[in-house]
Image (spheres, rainbow, N blue to C red):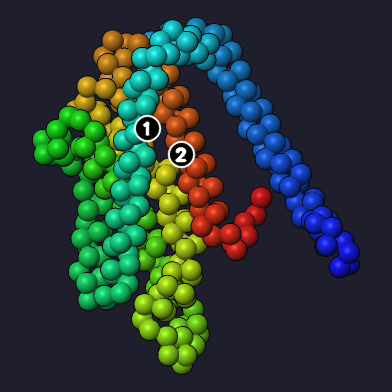
Amino acid sequence: MSVFFASGAPPEGERRAGPTAIRLILLRIVRIAAVTAGLLAVWQIAVTVLAVPAYILPTPTRIAAALAAQPAFLAHNALITGTEIVLGLIVGAVLGCATALAASLFPAAGRVMLPVMVASQALPVFAIAPLLVIWFGFGLASKIVMATLIIFFPVASAFLDGLRRTDPGLLDLATIAGASRFDTLRLIRLPSALPGLASGLRVAAAVAPIGAVVGEWVGASAGLGFVMLQANARMQTDTLFAALVLLAAMALIIRAGVDLFARRLTPWVSEAP
């Protein structure tokens, strides 16, 4: 056994883990591609057979043609919306984590902040967006703030819940060992709360595009939300769907990136394939 490890070769389980994980990923991609291709085929056939007008529901081929007809224009607007989403996600996650830590360390402050957090989520998004455009202008700032407001709550709520659900036995051991409040937070409460934070980040990544796009609908001169409004006004439904396809693709990419970060953040948490 010692000779085997001295040679630098990894254990048999580790050698198998890599190829197995790759096969699972490839199998998942193939399944998703097959299901997507089947749905697109049904969509294409149904629209063609039923003779649905293109301005009501374009076929996938028309949407692909719209994507191919103006790639630079759509890519430029997608980059703007993607920037708003990513910056809003970062700012919202940082503020959410800071709020959860403050509420956990200072319970009195937490009792004041929680009602404010809940009330902020009860306000309709479309009611807040015009105010943000007035306050922050038609540029990136208002869209980033809008995305931040939507992302903030799931991150803060999930992280705070994780901090509050730390195993009491571990906290008792830290008290017996004479650990300071900061050491208890750093060594026990934070690691225990990271799975909750990871869940909050995953939820935030899924809803992040909502804030940016709603902000663009209310007032913008660029972005995928702006493209959707202009295409809808001109009855260019294929361009509208092309913008939706790009927005969905960006959401999936951002969600995959956040999921990868969450797995790195909590490597000890085992997840079902």
Q: CA distance from mark 1 to mark 2?
A: 9 Å
Mark 2 lies on a secondary structure that is helix
Q: Residue at x 32, y 11 (%)?
A: 235
Q: Residue 254 has which mark?
A: 2
Residue 250: percent from left, percent from top: 44, 32
Quadrant including the N terminus:
bottom right
Q: Are marks 1 and 2 in contact (CB under 8 Å)?
A: yes
Q: Residues within 10 Å of mark 1 (few under 14, many from 20)?
A: many
Residue 153: percent from left, percent from top: 32, 54
Q: Dividing the picture into quarters, in which one does residue 264 lie?
A: bottom right
Q: Residue at x 40, y 10 (%)?
A: 70
Amino acid tagged 1: Gly
Amino acid tagged 2: Ile
Q: Residue at x 67, y 40 (%)?
A: 25
Residue at the disc numbered 1: 82
Identify whether 51 is placed above or below 224. Answer: above
Image side of residue 231 versus residue 17, left or right: left
Q: Residues within 10 Å of mark 2 (few under 14, many from 20)?
A: many
Mark 1 lies on a secondary structure that is helix
If you read the primary sequence from the N terminus, does the residue marked by circle 1 or circle 2 appear first? 1
Q: Residue furthest bottom?
A: 176
Identify whether 94 is placed above or below 26. Answer: below
Q: Residue 260 has which mark?
A: none
Q: Dividing the picture into quarters, in which one does residue 181 lie?
A: bottom left
Image side of residue 26 versus residue 217, left or right: right
Camera-side residue: 75 or 230? Answer: 75
- Is residue 52 among what the camera can see? no
Residue 146: percent from left, percent from top: 25, 41
- Is residue 37 among what the camera can see? yes
